[in-house]
Amino acid sequence: MKIFADLHNHSKYSRATSSIMDVEHQSKYGLIKGLNLLGTGDFSHPKWFKELKSKLVSSNNGIYEFNGMKWVLSTEISNIYSVDEPKNGVSVKKIHHVILSPNFEIAEQIQELLSKHGRIDYDGRPIFGRWTSQELVQDLMNISKRIFIFPAHIWTPWFSLFGSNSGYNNIKECYGKELKHIHALETGLSSDPSMNWRCSQLDNFTLISNSDSHSPWPWRLGREANAFELKELTYDALIDAIKTKKGFKFTIETIPAYGKYHYDGHRNCNIALTPEETKKFNGICPVCKKPLTIGVENRVEELSDMPLGRKPKNAIPFKKLLPLHELIKYDLNISSLNSKKIWELYNSLIKKFGNEFNILLNVSKDKLEEKGVNKLLAKLIIMNRNEELEIEPGYDGVYGKIKYVNNKKDNEKKSQKTLDFY
């Protein structure tokens, strides 16, 4: 059984999330994307929990279903706490974690645990202070060893395990004696496995990829995903595949430069810098003279102890892909991904080829053109599949974008300023 899974997303009860981030729309657009397993997100929120219980149909094996989409119970929480570090003194850590539950009964026990540490009714991704990552894992394991927990988007500058502004330099410092219960790490949009392979401390963990979507639209949902080949889909089989890597075929990653925290920079100053350029400015923005937001590539470089190109034993393969909407946006020279013209072309392609992953991964250039796809878009799809697209890197909350193809200019009126500008 082939499984395309996006295990980390959100509901309409999380802040800055679409009001239609519900079971119905996620099921519909997830299937259009090519996904067949989604994480519910936000089961810690009482209203969302109630809605999930009323709509999802149980298979009695930890997997639920709604309108052809399979679901696993998931939620994300934020831990913010202070630690006294020998070299740096007191520092604040801000770590996001994703939690998977095998059933509603255990999910309810997790809710009760979270309620002891703070409110869970104000946001789908609640924040808890003075509760360390190590304590969180220990408390969850005391409920059930079947609970699966992993740190989210581990390189993002804020709210992550290795974040430049809020993280640790070593994973053991974060989890201590509870590290034995951490089996997977989420790469995040701005890094891919090859970047993570440069850090030998991560070799014993499975690298997984998820969208962290706040919208059901296909350029968000499933933009990163995990591909499995399982004899049967159960909660325990899914977790075992992640832990052992058996049946875990590959991950789908956005091109790291597309992520909105890949390079260093300042969005208000419209400046993006490589790690080398940042060093020349001593980490200070040349425009506003304030500290730059240090991106993922710089942070990986800082913590890496292995050369680029190194691949650990038993590493899971990965494929780098931009969402189809991004390719159509470039082809049509339109600024908004939610444009009616983009949707019309997107929907016509889905009607012809079934789902987005099939288009991005499988359909040949000849078949694309035979079915009426114009030459530039067909070329973009194949270049995307072959990892030949060049991306102007994202930085400080700004997504990356496709550079010129065939000397075709995009519609952006302003471009990032680099070191050469100053």
Image: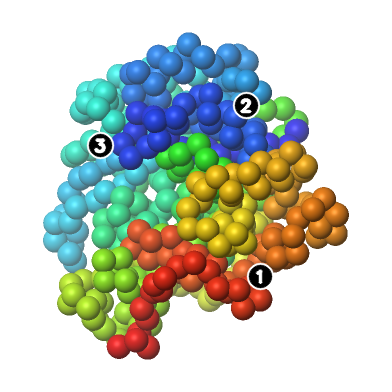
Position in image of residue 399 (x %, y %): 43, 60
Look at label 2 and name its amino acid. Met
First reached walking from the N terminus: tag 2 or tag 1: 2
Position in image of residue 341 (x %, y %): 58, 48
Look at label 3 and name its amino acid. Ile
Look at label 1 and name its amino acid. Glu
First reached walking from the N terminus: tag 3 or tag 2: 2
Work out whether 239 lies above or below 207. above
Of residues 388 and 41, the one nearer the viewer is 388
Of residues 182 and 343, the one nearer the viewer is 343
Q: Quadrant of the C terminus?
A: bottom left
User: Residue 388, which numbered label?
Assistant: 1
Badge 1: few (under 14), some or many (20 or more) residues near its Cα, within 10 Å?
A: few
Q: Kindly report the distance in space between the C-alpha atoms of the residues bearing marks 1 and 3.
A: 40 Å
User: Residue 127, which numbered label?
Assistant: 3
The reply to whether callout 3 and callout 2 are in contact (CB within 8 Å) is no
Quarter holding residue 266:
bottom left
Of residues 286 and 45, the one nearer the viewer is 286
Q: Nearer the viewer's eye, disc 1 or disc 3?
A: 1
Secondary structure, mark 1, is loop
| Chosen colour scheme | rainbow
